[in-house]
Amino acid sequence: MSTTPYGGAVVSPTDGDARMPAARDERSIGQLLKELQNDSTTLVRQEVELAKAEVRESLQTYARSAVSMAIGGALLLAALFGVLWTINMALTTVLEGAVGLEIAVWLSPLLLSAVIAAIGYAMVNGARNRMREESIIPRRTTETLKEEKQWLKNRHA
């Protein structure tokens, strides 16, 4: 141990029993609890914002799929009215030679309707499958909340 020019003592780490005092947090329990409360409130707010963002993202996917379904439906209707009549006339003429006019008159529209319905079904089914893949539940937020719950359980155990 040595002294300073002003009369103070200086302890070096090599001095025997002289130990340096540990740094101490001077905050009271009340202050620590207040800080914990503020941090918890901030965390919950951030989780709510994350959940909102995930729901917005899911709703946008649903909206795009719904638009696709509507367009598919409109195309089905346009195909039904525009193409069906034209092809029906040609197919009726072709079938008339094979099965007779009495059968060709109803068989032609039936065949055409089946083909157009299959195309429309494929479009609607594709959009529905995309909607099933996208969940409205905010997955990332749910996982984070589960992790935080487990962390709190482990911390208080």
Image (spheres, grey):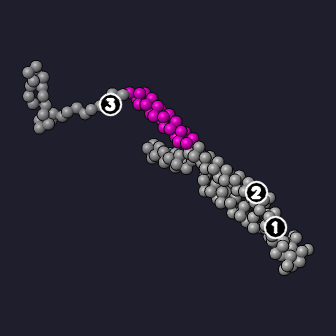
The amino acid beneath tag 1 is Asn
In the picture provided, is 56 more to the left or to the right than 3? right
Residue matched to label 2: 78
Q: Residue furthest right?
A: 102
Residue matched to label 3: 25
Q: Main secondary structure of the magenta part?
A: helix
In this view, the residue in front, 13 or 118, is: 118
| Quadrant housing the N terminus | top left
Where disc 3 sits, the SS reads loop
Task: Give the number of the mark in front: 1 or 3.
Answer: 1
In the picture provided, is 37 more to the left or to the right than 6? right
| Quadrant housing the C terminus | top left
Give the alpha-carbon distance from disc 2 to disc 3, as whole Å.
Answer: 75 Å
Give the alpha-carbon distance from disc 1 to disc 2, as whole Å.
Answer: 15 Å
Q: What percent of the width, then of the height, locates residue 84?
A: 79, 63
Q: Confirm whether residue 94 shows in the render.
A: yes
Give the alpha-carbon distance from disc 1 to disc 3, as whole Å.
Answer: 88 Å
Residue matched to label 1: 88
Tag 3 or tag 1, which sits nearer the N-term? 3
Where disc 2 sits, the SS reads helix
